[in-house]
Image (cartoon, helix red, strand yellow):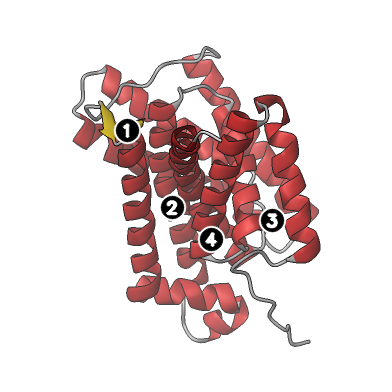
Amino acid sequence: MDVNYLIKQLLNGLAAGSIYALVAVGYNMVYGILELINFAHGDIYMFGTFIALALLERHLPAPVAIPLACLAGGLTGMLVERVAYRPVRNAPRVVPMLSAVGAALVLRNLAQLIWGTETMPFPQLFPTRMIQVGEVQFNSLQVIILALALSLTGLFALIVRRTKLGKATRCVAQDIPAARLMGIEVNRIIQFVYFAGGFFGVAGGVLFAMYYAVWIGMGFLGTMKAWIACIIGGIGSLQGAFVGGLILGVTEALISGFVSSAYRDAICYGLVMLVLVFRPMGIFGRQVAEKV
């Protein structure tokens, strides 16, 4: 086996996996609180990424355009929660799922109406060059993406664990009725979670677009990758979502590099099946007894 080629594939996998991880973090938080598969999450970050591209094309500086796009993604998440999810929150489980699919389709078709169906290149926001370490050569963009994903995920974890708003979020995740009795404004906390998911999701979408491109189908792809990462890492766990994303990215890169890209998705779904059989709660998930 060529060690240099192996290292190059690992770096490719870590770069892609860190993007999956960043998208999965917000996705995981919504499920951890409401136990709802947020099918609109990927289309929210797709929509925000297109907004970032539109702002950059209007020659807005990247330090202004990207935060504005992330803010737009967060606000879109709040709007989707208020319109599509909150009215059916207490309905049978299938109703919110259908509402989520409807919200995703609305966002996807709106993006198609505004920007069309073509795949568009995304501007490179950082100067990139090839780095030589020994006999291994890799792109500096891979290192930048991994560093940014780690930093943003660390910031999100810090907010959840150290701030008053984050503590209230963890209380709501444990028990919504009890949190309401303690005086926590549950609706405000849930909107914060949707805002944070959309905000950090767009950040992941921008990194994804720099590494690949922008198209309306990237939302569905992101939803599937994020869900797989959450299953592998553990539903409701921030570190699990991040580690699951990295594992998924590295697995895809190794399969594409040493087997065939045609088998990549099939083997990854097989990995998910193995996790569900032998570790249903995921790597970092914990089985919690529910009082009845």
Callout 2, which amino acid?
Phe
Given contact means CB atoms under 8 Å apart, are the residues at marks 2 and 3 in contact? no
* Dot 1: element: helix
How much space separates mark 2 and mark 3, taking CA atoms? Answer: 19 Å
Lateral position of residue 70 relative to residue 7, left or right:
left
The quadrant of the rendering that contains the C terminus is: bottom right
Q: Is residue 279 above or below residue 13?
A: below
How much space separates mark 1 and mark 2, taking CA atoms? Answer: 27 Å
Lateral position of residue 61 relative to residue 207, left or right:
left
Q: In the picture, residue 153 is in which quadrant?
A: bottom left
* Closer-to-camera residue (96/9): 9
- Percent x, y for residue 215? 52, 21
Residue at horizontal 36%, vertical 53%? 150
Residue at horizontal 53%, vertical 74%? 172
Number of labels in the image equals 4
- Percent x, y for residue 44? 51, 39
Callout 1, which amino acid?
Leu
Which residue is denoted by mark 2 in the rendering?
195
Question: Sequence order check: which comes first, mark 1 or mark 4?
Answer: 4
Mark 2, mark 3: which one is toward the viewer? Answer: 2
Which residue is denoted by mark 3 in the rendering?
88
Residue at horizontal 69%, vertical 56%? 88
Which residue is denoted by mark 1 in the rendering?
141
